[in-house]
Image: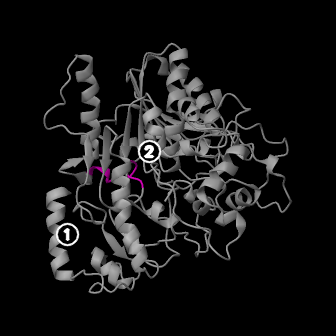
Amino acid sequence: MKLLGHVAYLLLLGGICCQNNRNVKPSSKTTKKVLGNQNQGTDAVQSAPEEEPHPGPVVLGKDGNSGGRSAATDDMKLFFLKNAQVTCNDGTAAGFYLKEFKGSKRWLIFLEGGWCCFNKESCDTRYKNIPRLMSSSDWPQTRKGSGILSAQTEENPHWYNANIVFIPYCSSDVWSGTGPAATKEKRVQGKEKEKDKDDYTFMGSLIIREVIKDLVPKGIKLAKVVMLAGTSAGGTGVLLNIERVSSQLEQLGAEAQVRGLVDSGWFLESKQQKVPNCPDNVSFSPVDSIKRGLKLWNGVVPDKCQQQYKKGEEWQCFFGHKLYTSLTAPLFVVQWLFDEEQLRVENIYLGGQTLSEQQWTYIQNLGKELKNSLKDVTAVFAPSCLSHTLITKSNWMTFQVKGTSLPRALQCWDKSFQEANRNSKTQLKGCPFNLIDTCQWPQCNPTCPALVDQATQQELTLLQMLVGMGLDLQKLGLEPQRDGSSLTSMASNGG
C-alpha cells in the first residue's frame, strides 16, 4: 500500500495499471462517494480545490502577476516566479496563486497533489493526458479556494483570515525535484515528435523555494505562523520540504513558526506484486518507481532522514511513518483509515469490480495498519472512512472523529502552541487534536462521506456495496441485520 505504489498507478493518472481508465472527476462539494464501474472518477490528483473553467490565456501584468480582468475579493490571483529558470516540466513558467489578508501574520501555503511520472514513457503519457500537471500554459488567472483555502468564515472559521498561497503542481516529482532546466525547445501539446527524457525538467522543491522568496515583498518575513499544507502527493511534499522551508525562512530573518499539515499523503508501502501482462513502465513496484524517479528528478529528501539510510535507500523517506521521527517541525496528519488511493494501488476499486475474500481481508487490515503507523503522531485526525483528501473539500467541517471536527482539532492544535508559550504543560480540556477512530470497519463513522451507486444514484451501506461486489456475507460471517446494528454501535462508541 504505498505512496508510490501509486506512483505507478496514478502517475498515468487516470490509472492505467491494467484497469480501465477512470476519467470522471468527482465533485469536491458533496459528501457522497460515487461508486460504480472503473470508468468513474479517480483523483488523488484533482482533490485540491475544484478547478474553475479556464478563462483563456494568462496575460502578464506588472511584477509577473496576471493582468486582465480584476479578481474578486475572495479569489486567489496568479503570480509567476520572478526566477524564470525554475519552471514546470515543459519549461513554462512556474508560479503560485495568492489571496492576501491585510494585516494578517498567518500564512497558509498549499501544495497541490497529482502523483508523478518517473521515466520517459510515463511522463509522455502524463503530458498527453493531463498537461495541466506539467505545464502552466492553461492556468486560469484566478481561482477560488475551498475548505481550508476558503476566504469564507462559515466554510473556514479558523484560517479564513490568513494569507493563502496555492502552488499548482506542475513538476511531477512529488515536490522533491531539483533537476536541471529543460532544453530550450519547449514542448508543444499534441506535437508528435520523439523527445528525450531531458526535455522535461523536475523542480518541485526549487519551486517551493522560489515561491517563498517571491513572498518576501508580500510580508512573509513578518509572519508569526506559516503552515505548509498539501493533499495526496502535495501532502508527501510537505513531509519532504517542511524542514527546508523552516530553514529558508530563518535565513531570511523571519521568526515564524513553521508547521505542516499533511492530508492523505501518509502512505504505506504497497504489498502488490508485479502484475502479469502489464507494460513494464506501469508494473514497476512502488519502490522501483520511486528509485527511478529520484534519479530522474534529482530528488532530495530531508537531511536527517537521509542520514538514517544507506545510499540507494533514500526512497524510504517518502513514507511518513519512516520519516516522521526525524522531523523537528510540528506536523498535523489527516488520513482516512481506508484511503481509496491506498486501495487502488492494490488494484481494489470499491464499487467498480468484484471483490475477493482476500481483498476484503486486506481492506479490513488496512485500517489497523494505518492506525499502527500513526501511533507516534502527536496531532492526527483519522476517520474510519473510504475516501481520499479532506482539507480542501467545501464540506470539510462535517466530518468528525469522536465528536470533534477537523477545523476544531486544528484550532485546538493551534491553542496548544499558545499554551506552550505560557509554559503550560497540560492540554486544554475539551480541545483534543489526537483523534483516531476506534471502530474497525470502513464507513463505521457516521459522518463518513456517503457511498453512492453510480448507476442508480442511490446511497449504499457498506454491506450493500459488498453484496453488489459479489461477496457472500453469510460465508464471511457477516449477517446484514446483526452487523448493521453492530456497525451503528461501533460508530457511536468510536466514531
- Residue at 33% x, 52% y: name it: 371
Can the viewer see residue 72 in this picture? no
- Mark 1 highlights which residue? 487
- Residue at 48% x, 17% y: name it: 221
Quadrant for residue 22, please give it: bottom right
Magenta range is: 389-397
Q: Residues within 10 Å of mark 2 (few under 14, many from 20)?
A: some
Residue 486, image x and y in percent?
16, 71
> Which mark sits nearer the N-terminus, 2 or 1?
2
The label nearer to you, 2 versus 1, is: 2
Quadrant for residue 244, please give it: top right
Q: Is residue 189 above or below residue 181?
A: below
- From mark 2 to mark 1, how far is it between C-alphas? 29 Å
- Residue at 69% x, 53% y: name it: 118
Under mark 2, the amino acid is His
Report the coloring of the rendering.
one colour
Classify residue 88 as left or right of residue 489.
right
Q: Nearer the viewer, residue 360 or 137?
A: 360
Is 326 part of what is drawn in magenta? no
Q: Nearer the viewer, residue 380 or 407?
A: 380
**Residue positioned most to the top:** 253
Classify residue 274 as left or right of residue 281.
left
Classify residue 245 as left or right of residue 108.
right
Which SS does the magenta portion mostly show? loop
Q: Is residue 397 above or below residue 442?
A: above
